[in-house]
Image: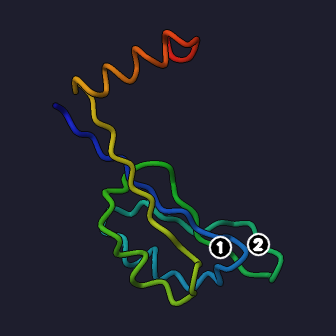
Amino acid sequence: MIEEEISYPVINKEICKGCMRCIVGCPQNAILLSEDMNNAGYQFAYYSGNGCTGCKDCYFTCPEPLGLEVHQIKNITNNSIAKMIKAKVASKGGIK
């Protein structure tokens, strides 16, 4: 069984006030400050698209409730149960 974890921050641009705590707190430098502004007139942080390891430092430094979440997805491959589920879905016209 091979387990792969995919992590990425989701930043609510309308709640973000551009304080840059998440940017400074990210050890991978995966979060940047946008040139654009949200409806409240603040520049907002955004995920660059790569580099997130799921450490959650950005989440714990964000002062805004619900301003930032870290999503983590575990993808299990080469597992007999996963193969059985994929085969069943494929037989019903899903994944091929």
Farthest residue, direction left:
1
Kindly indicate the quadrant of the structure image that contains residue 80.
top left
Residue 96 placement, left or right of 1: right
User: Does residue 31 sit above or below 58 in this rendering?
Assistant: above
- What residue sits 56% from the left and 17% below the top? 94
Could you say which is closer to the camera, residue 3 or residue 17? 3
- What residue sits 55% from the left and 13% below the top? 92
Could you say which is closer to the camera, residue 49 or residue 34? 49
Q: Residues within 10 Å of mark 1 (few under 14, many from 20)?
A: many
- What residue sits 80% from the left and 81% below the top? 41
Q: Amino acid at mark 2?
A: Met
C-beta proximity under 8 Å, tags 2 and 1 = yes
Residue 62 placement, left or right of 55: right
Q: Residues within 10 Å of mark 2 (few under 14, many from 20)?
A: some
Assign the N terminus to one quadrant of the image.
top left
Mark 2 or mark 1: whose residue is earlier in sequence: 2
Estimate the spatial distance between the alpha carbons at disc 2 and disc 1, rounded to whole Å: 6 Å
Residue 93 placement, left or right of 57: right
Q: Which mark is residue 37?
A: 2
Q: Position of residue 77 (x, y in %)?
A: 27, 29
Farthest residue, direction bottom:
63
User: Does residue 32 sit above or below 8 in this rendering?
Assistant: below
- Labels in figure, total: 2
- What residue sits 46% from the left and 74% below the top? 23
Q: What colour scheme was applied to this rendering of the protein?
A: rainbow
Find numbered disc 2 in the image and state the secondary structure of the residue it sits on.
strand
Kindly indicate the quadrant of the structure image that contains residue 70.
bottom left
Find numbered disc 1 in the image and state the secondary structure of the residue it sits on.
strand
Judging by the rendered image, the residue that carries numbered circle 1 is 44
Q: Position of residue 42 (x, y in %)?
A: 73, 81
Q: Amino acid at mark 1?
A: Phe
Q: Position of residue 75 (x, y in %)?
A: 33, 39
